Structures are given as structure tokens and as C-alpha cells.
Image (cartoon, rainbow, N blue to C red):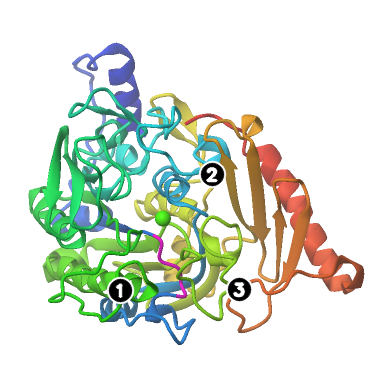
Amino acid sequence: MIAASLLACALADGPPQRTRQPRAEPPPLLTLDAQMAAQPNFLVLMLDDIGVDQVATWERSDSATPTPELDALAARGLRFDRAYASATCSPARSALLTGRSARRTGVGSIVRVLQDRVDLPTEAWTLAEMLVARGYDTAAVGKWHLSARSTALGGRWLGDPAEQGFRRFRGTMGNLTDGAGLLPGQGYYLFEQVDDAELWSRSGYATTHQVDDAVSTLSDLREPWFLYFAPNAAHDPFDLPPTGLASTTASPGTRGAYQAIIRALDMEIGRLMDALSPAVAARTHIVLLSDNGSPKSVIVEPFDHRRGKATLYDGGTQVPLLWAGPGVVQGTTDALAHATDIVPTVLALLGEDPSTPQVGPDGPVSFDGVDLSPVLRDPAAEVRTYVFTSLHWPNGDPADANIVEDAVRSDDFKLIRRADGSEAVFAYVEGAVDEGPELDASAMTSAQVAGTDALRAALSAHLSETVYEGR
Ligand SMILES: [Ca+2]
């Protein structure tokens, strides 16, 4: 908190004045081991367009892709079986990095690189900025997708990772087909790369390059560090990976190609894990999630192909989430979780109370996420009664948006409020992969009426609480 205040002061008035203050008792000196335990490293992996139906680690679908490296990571920690992010890429990344809802930040749909006027505001107080204020070194590698604006071709990107607390950035500003116009973004083998402020054209296989970048960046970071690694895989275009990485007889653009991209990503994530020495791994929290569910073109049975990415159904918003690290139990959990929970949980792991508003450069910041650390210690712990997801387009104040949709779920029920104001309600069935068929409002049991009425009340309260702040 003191460091945050100093930073706020530095930003507002220039560097803090060096005045000699008489000090009371000095704080006890921590041994290096204790300091490292108090300030663990954080490696956060944000995958792209990979739902729980696609990775065998989640055991949801017979046609999931084998993911032995994710299996190994899951075996080291906790697998969340009811975790949510967003319907599309950018809102999930905003939620992850700010701990705040799309309704509050204004990032409710994808940020269209070089086309939109609204992106994640630089005033947003990100996890990277919070950790820098606590003495951490920070870097982002891979897809950013939170900045729409470039000042000039080959020049600075406004709202880029450097403005959001990351000392280093090596990656892509959006999807592999996006770009600043240096060359047409062509996919996994030819794409625009930004290394800090330097824009260049990169050839070779994107997933391999991005893991190479993550590995070399790790060697450049001093502990304690926060590395945000967001590979573009497995977002389209579905180009075939190099045969040495994941061979397939599938044609480009098909689900077979998409599965090969996931296999290649899984192998390369294993290489990243191997880059952490056992000693460093022992003091590192590893968090892995995806930004949204599987695209409708590749989502598989028993998921409904109409309920994939870009919808608020579970197929669009439920995502893989793994957490491994010091003190984290091994196993699986049914605890409800959301991408906004990562920031409060990280702060709790640092011994802080995330329910107290943090002081950022632009004033107090409260979170919409909750602290998952009780679940990391006890998978049966319940920290959430409800999970809210939403989308709105265009980005900015939801009150000004053309399309706004909201969803809320509890353990047993789900409600979706569509853009036209109509509602659909659902009841979860034990063992089912998603929310199942829409309930018939004229034939609901009293328990279903009570359960969905509770969701309606919870959503109303949520909407009145999550007021747009544009940061
Ligand atoms: Ca995505």
C-alpha cells in the first residue's frame, strides 16, 4: 500500500522527494528464503479459444485432444471444473489483468486492433502495476489484444503492455491475422511481432517462437517476477503445426488442424515448464486458463455447436483453469470461479486483504473478483455463490452499447438475459457438461422458480453495483 501511494505520488507530482524521516523500529529482516516464500513468482498462462471440451485433462468429451503436459500440470495442483472467463478474447484478458468486470472497465467485446477507439484504458490498475508497486519484475509474452491504438506505423502502441505495468513485452498486438499494416497478418507462420516498441515481421511457427520468447524472458527477469504468457494458439487461422511438433493428416482450417495446434501448444507448454528449475518452480504459482470457450466451428459433442465462443452459454464462457504452486493442494474442485478472481487471489497469497480497495494512481480500485485462496487450500471451500458474465458491443460504457447481454449462474441454475431483454433459464443436471436445455417457464417446479428468481435478484444487485468507471 505504501509503495502504491508512492507510485501514485510519483505519477502525479514527479519523483517523490527524498526527505529524511526519523524511523521507528526497523522491520525485521527476512531471510532470503522467507522473502521468497512471502513473494512467490507468478506465471500466468492465458490460452486462446480452448474450451473444456477440447483438452483431455478436463475429461468432458471423448473427442478431446490428449494434453499430457496439461495433465502433468493439473497433477501438480488444482483443476477447476466450473471456471468462467468471457465470451471473447479481449474481455477475458481485461478481467484477468484488472480483477474487474467488463461492465466496469468497458471492455465488453474484442478490441479491434487499429480500428476501435476504445480499449483497456491506461488508467486501469493492472495486476502487473500492482505487483511492480510491490517490488516485482514483470513481462508479457504473446497476444495482448487490449490496445486498439498505434501512434504511427512502427512506433508506439498506446495502451500497450508497457503502459500497463509490464517492463518487457514480446508478442502480438492481437490475433495472428491482425497487424499494423507492415505486412498482411497471415497466420502462424508469418505475423507481426512487437518487441517492446519495435515492430517487425516474423516468420516461423508462432507457438514455438512464443515459448522461446517466454523462456528467454524468464532468464531476464529477476525474482520475484510476474510473467504473463498468452500464446495465440489455438485461435484461428487453423494452420497445420510443423510435423515435427504435431503431425496430422487433417487439412488446414479443419477441427483436425485445430486439434494439432492444441497438441503442439501442449508440447511447447511442457518445454516452458521444463525451463523452470525445480528450485524456482517451488516458489512459483502457475495459473493456466483460457479466455473463452471453443469456437462454434470446432466445439464438440456433447457440447451444443450453437453455444460456443461469442455466446454466454457455458460452451462460450466456461474455460479450463489450473492453479499449481506452493501451498496449493492437488485435486479437482467444483468451486465456482471467474477470471476476475485471479487478481484478488494473488493479493491474498501475498498476505493482503483483497476486499479492501487498492489505491491505484487514479484512486481506490475495488475488484469484482473474489479471493480463491481458500479453495487453493481446501477444494471443498465455497467462495462464490454466483458467477456473472456479460458482453457488450461496442466497447465503452455499457449504457451506450448497441448490444448488451448478461448471464448469472449458481450451483444449480443459470439465467441469460439477452440483448432484446428476454430471459432464458436453465437447471444444471448432475454429470451434464453444460446448462442443458432451456427450462419451460410454464412448467417449472417450485425449486426451479425459487432458484431462478434468486438469480434474477442477484443479477439486479450485480448490475447496480458494477457501475462503469472506464478503468
Ligand atoms: Ca479467444
Specify the quarter for ligand 1: bottom left
The answer for how far apart the CA atoms under marks 3 and 2 are is: 23 Å
> Which residue lies under the disc numbered 3?
434
Q: Amino acid at mark 2?
A: Ser
Q: Amino acid at mark 3?
A: Asp
Span highlighted in magenta in the image: 49-53
> Which residue lies under the disc numbered 1?
251
Residue 264: give x, y in percent of width and height. Answer: 23, 72
- Which tag, 1 or 3, sits closer to the chain's start? 1
Residue 455: give x, y in percent of width and height. Answer: 74, 57
**Left or right of 274: which side holds 328?**
right
> Which residue lies under the disc numbered 2?
101
User: How would you rate the neighbour count of disc 2 (Cα within 10 Å): few for under 14, some for 14-19, many for 20 or more?
Assistant: many
The answer for how far apart the CA atoms under marks 1 and 3 are is: 30 Å
Is any atom of residue 84 visible in this view? yes
Residue 444 part of the magenta-drawn span: no
Give the vertical position of 469 relative to 281 (above or below): above
Q: What residue is at 32 percent from the left and 82 percent from the top?
A: 66
User: Which mark identifies residue 66?
Assistant: none
Query: In front here: 331 or 464?
Result: 464
The answer to whether marks 3 and 2 mark residues whose Cβ atoms lie closer than 8 Å is no
The answer to whether marks 1 and 2 mark residues whose Cβ atoms lie closer than 8 Å is no
User: How would you rate the neighbour count of disc 3 (Cα within 10 Å): few for under 14, some for 14-19, many for 20 or more?
Assistant: many
Disc 3 is placed on an element classified as: loop
Q: Amino acid at mark 1?
A: Ser
